[in-house]
Image (tube, grey):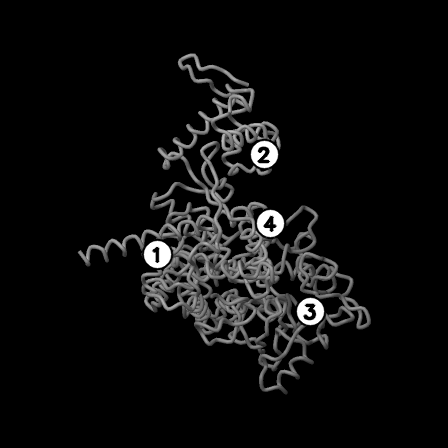
């Protein structure tokens, strides 16, 4: 999981004792190597975030580079009294949205777009997390397989839901902070995150059931 | 309430009843979950459906409204078959159960730490934590790649080269100066090779350095004129920076003319001795070149200030400038760090030119480039004398702090900010 606060240097990545905000401050006053420290410090988390958001490692790497290029261009505008990490992830989400638009894989979405299908075609089904098989983090599972299944469940989400879900869980911010970062009303953050978690849980359940069905079919085929 | 389709013998519900029925089905037959404007009708439809469920065979007699019941049953059947037959046409949007929704709110409120969620919701918050971990902690393929870091840095470097090249060839970031000025300053720089060689060691910075030097030379003319008009005094606009017993918060509070040292420099602008462009260094991306209002008396913000100016003594005095006195320099890295609560490095160079050194405007109106913040006489231009003494005493100079209330200790103490 990502570090709680960038007030302290991240434990993973670089052993540089400076905080993210100090590193950016140093970078803009001419300390070029500070950027490498920042990139290395956030590489794993940011790349995971972008891969989940874009569904492709190659697209994520492009967005990753675009993100740090934007950090370089906008370094002087960053208010070092604020936290660096939410700024980084917000820029990354914008770059990911640009990628989606550029690749025309998805229609352009705006943060103010309504959630879900329009009008009378929308119905609701309630998700109970206690009834869904979500593995605990310490469960011994095939990580590659698990990763593929997670991505399959995320890919079924609309870009809007995918973005709020990943931003919230990667940044671990309060609703108010997310609303501030994304410039959307607090109530929208709350309803959208609820919808995103419910949709992800449902998709995860579908993926799991499909996997089990596939396994059973394989076993039946083997025994026959 | 009951209408008949012209092409069918089946009775059909009125539009409002059909809407209420739809809403009731959407709400999983929970009348209380139906929007209030439809609730009464939905309740009635629900009562009829209840009859359908409990006394289907006797429905005609029991309800006394067999047409409505029949229409309702038909509508329900249609709804069910429509759902079954067109799963793709109908978007089923999952929502969290109310317990899970409450748990998610509590989980977010607790900073996404399930152990801090109140007991009643902790178990469900734990499931949210599992979902969060699934999303954020699951490995992605080929996670670590130093090649990606190198490629990213190369992308940034290409942008630096591109923007430096643009600076050299079209001068877009250099406000208020023309090609002719750049060329003439560049020619002078070549003549004064002994002074300027260190500056030009990186040829790509030539444009910025030359433009900055040119701007400072213009500002120097304004200083000279002002001092001629005001008995050799340096420009001052503020009445003072408080007293020892009642100090101001910080003289780096740019934007508050009564407290800001930058307002003293800015004083040259409204009085007509210098333009804001001449007080801007192209190496400062946030440099301000237009007043924020016609009656402005200070720069907009600390970052908008390109040059650091002499701080007076507490009695607002400066020594009459001599040729070797530094009046102005590229902005102080010490103040930029101190104002944001970061440790300061007293020997750092200005960020205006990539921390390679800084321009200084001397008392005789000349513009020099110095590679170090300490002058030949040992005076550090970023610090007042008392703090310089502290710095010499402590081995780890990074331990010093500034509060923005320090002032020059002597009239000849060069101490610049913001």
**Separation of disc 3 and disc 4 at Cα?**
26 Å
Q: Chain letter for mark 3, please.
A: B
| Residue at image mark 3 | B404
Q: CA distance from mark 1 to mark 2?
A: 37 Å
Callout 3–callout 2 Cβ contact below 8 Å: no
Q: Residue at x 38, y 52 (%)?
A: A153
Pointer 1: residues within 10 angstroms few (<14), some, or many (20+)?
some
Residue placed furthest toward the top: B6
Name the outermost residue toward the right.
Answer: B245
**Real-space CA distance between mark 3 and mark 2, rounded to the nearest whole angstrom:** 60 Å
Asked if the residue at tag 2 contacts the one at tag 1, i.e. Cβ–Cβ closer than 8 Å, the answer is no
**Residue visible at 60% across and 58% down in the picture:** B109
- Considering the image in quadrants, where does the C terminus of chain B appear? bottom right
Residue A193 appears at what percent x and percent y?
51, 50
Mark 2 nearby-residue class (10 Å; few <14, some 14–19, many ≥20): some
Kindly check if marks 3 and 4 are in contact, taking CB atoms under 8 A apart as contact. Answer: no
Tell which circle, 3 or 4, labels the residue nearer the N-terminal end. 4
Q: Chain of mark 4?
A: B
Q: Quick one: SS at disc 1?
A: helix
Host chain of mark 1 = A
When the figure is inspected, residue A188 is found, relative to residue B152, above or below; the finding is above
Q: CA distance from mark 1 to mark 3?
A: 56 Å
SS of the residue under disc 3: loop
Residues at discs 2 and 4 in contact (Cβ within 8 Å):
no
The tag earlier along the polypeptide, 2 or 4, is 2
Image mark for residue B37: none
Mark 3: give few (<14), some (14-19) or many (20+) Cα within 10 Å.
many
Label 2 sits on residue: B35
Residue mark closest to the camera, 3 vs 2: 2
The x and y percentages for residue A63 are 38, 55
Which residue matches tag 4? B290
């Amino acid at each position: 999981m990502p570090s709680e606060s960038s007030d302290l240097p991240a434990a993973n990545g670089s052993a540089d004792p400076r905080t993210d905000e100090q590193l950016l401050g140093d970078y803009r006053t001419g300390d070029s190597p500070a950027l490498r420290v920042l990139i290395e410090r956030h590489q794993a988390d940011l790349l995971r975030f972008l891969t989940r958001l874009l569904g492709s490692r190659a697209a994520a790497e492009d967005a990753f580079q675009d993100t740090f290029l934007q950090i370089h261009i906008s370094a002087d505008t960053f208010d070092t009294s604020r936290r660096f990490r939410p700024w980084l992830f917000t820029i990354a989400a914008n770059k990911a949205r640009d990628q989606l638009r550029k690749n025309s894989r998805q229609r352009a979405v705006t943060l103010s777009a309504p959630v879900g299908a329009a009008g009378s075609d929308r119905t609701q089904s309630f998700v109970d997390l206690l009834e869904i098989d979500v593995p605990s983090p310490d469960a011994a599972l095939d990580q590659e397989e698990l990763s593929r299944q997670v991505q399959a469940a995320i890919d079924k989400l609309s870009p809007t839901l995918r973005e709020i879900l990943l931003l919230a869980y990667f940044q671990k911010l309060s609703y108010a902070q997310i609303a501030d970062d994304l410039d959307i009303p607090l109530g929208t953050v709350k309803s959208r995150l609820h919808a995103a978690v419910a949709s992800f849980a449902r998709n995860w359940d579908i993926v799991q059931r499909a996997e089990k069905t596939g396994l059973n079919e394989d076993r039946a085929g083997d025994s026959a | 309430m009951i209408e008949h389709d012209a092409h069918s013998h089946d009775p059909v519900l009125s539009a409002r009843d059909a809407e209420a029925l739809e809403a009731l089905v959407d709400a999983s037959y929970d009348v209380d979950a139906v929007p209030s404007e439809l609730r009464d009708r939905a309740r009635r439809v629900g009562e009829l459906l209840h009859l359908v469920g409990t006394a289907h065979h006797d429905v005609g007699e029991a309800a006394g409204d067999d047409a409505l019941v029949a229409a309702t049953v038909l509508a329900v059947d249609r709804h069910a078959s429509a759902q079954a037959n067109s799963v793709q046409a109908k978007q089923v949007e999952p929502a969290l159960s109310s317990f899970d929704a409450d748990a998610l709110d509590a989980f977010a409120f607790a900073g996404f730490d399930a152990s801090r969620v109140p007991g009643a919701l902790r178990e469900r918050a734990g499931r949210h934590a599992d979902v969060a971990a699934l999303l954020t902690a699951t490995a992605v393929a080929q996670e670590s790649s130093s090649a990606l870091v190198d490629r990213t840095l190369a992308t940034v470097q290409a942008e630096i080269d591109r923007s430096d090249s643009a600076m050299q060839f079209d001068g877009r970031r250099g406000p208020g100066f023309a090609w002719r000025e750049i060329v003439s300053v560049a020619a002078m720089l070549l003549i004064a090779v002994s002074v300027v060689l260190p500056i030009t060691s990186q040829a790509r910075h030539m444009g910025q350095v030359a433009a900055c030097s040119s701007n400072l030379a213009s500002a120097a003319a304004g200083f000279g004129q002002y001092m001629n008009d005001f008995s050799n005094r340096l420009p001052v606009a503020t009445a003072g920076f408080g007293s020892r017993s009642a100090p101001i918060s910080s003289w780096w509070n740019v934007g508050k003319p009564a407290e800001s040292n930058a307002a003293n420099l800015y004083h040259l602008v409204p009085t007509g001795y210098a333009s804001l462009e001449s007080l801007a260094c192209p190496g400062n991306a946030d440099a301000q070149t237009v007043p924020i209002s016609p009656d402005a008396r200070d720069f907009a913000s600390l970052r908008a200030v390109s040059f650091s100016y002499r701080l007076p003594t507490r009695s607002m005095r400066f020594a009459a400038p001599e040729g070797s006195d530094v009046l102005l320099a590229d902005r102080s890295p010490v103040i930029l760090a101190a104002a944001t609560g970061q440790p300061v490095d007293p020997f750092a160079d200005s960020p205006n030119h990539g921390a390679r050194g800084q321009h200084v405007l001397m008392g005789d109106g000349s513009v020099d480039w110095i590679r170090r913040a300490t002058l030949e006489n040992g005076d550090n231009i970023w610090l007042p004398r008392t703090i310089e003494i502290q710095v010499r005493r402590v081995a780890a100079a990074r331990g010093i702090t500034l509060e923005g209330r320090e002032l020059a200790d002597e009239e000849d103490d060069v101490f610049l900010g913001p």
